[in-house]
Amino acid sequence: MTIDKLCEGTVLTIKINGRLDTTTAPQLDTVLDEALPGMTDVTLDCANMAYISSAGLRVLLKAQKVMNKQGSMKLIHVNEEVAEVFDITGFSDILTVE
């Protein structure tokens, strides 16, 4: 998995490329832990995210909890497979998916 980060003031965009699973979730968790303080608007571009596991869901939930206190977070360009995981797990009710 690769992560591309673009920060403009308090607006952060992160592009996730590849599989967000047990092996790669800690990498995204570290990026988010470092990048979220002070951000008011976070967008996760999932156009190239092929898969998400429960470990990836935990990272997204943790980030959402942080952003609930300081701004907003949304996921964009989510493919059908990942959207189905969000629906089955109830994460589509927790996360803003556009």
Image (tube, helix red, strand yellow):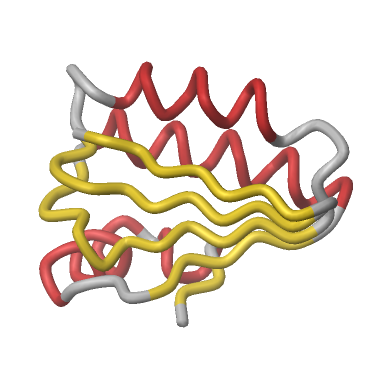
Of residues 64 and 6, the one nearer the viewer is 6
Q: Position of residue 41 (x, y in %)?
A: 75, 60
Of residues 17 and 20, the one nearer the viewer is 17
Q: Specify whether 46 is left or right of 35.
A: left
Which residue is depicted at the point 22% across and 48% down? 17
Which residue is depicted at the point 42% across and 33% down? 58
User: Residue 62 lies in what quarter of the image?
Assistant: top right
Of residues 23 and 95, the one nearer the viewer is 23
Quadrant in the picture for the N terminus: top left
Q: Position of residue 80 (x, y in %)?
A: 15, 76
Q: Position of residue 53 (x, y in %)?
A: 20, 38
Vertical placement of residue 24 versus 81, above or below: above
Q: Specify whether 74 is left or right of 68.
A: left
Q: Position of residue 50 (x, y in %)?
A: 11, 54
Vertical placement of residue 10 versus 45, above or below: above
In the rendered picture of this protein, how many numbered marks are placed on residues? 0
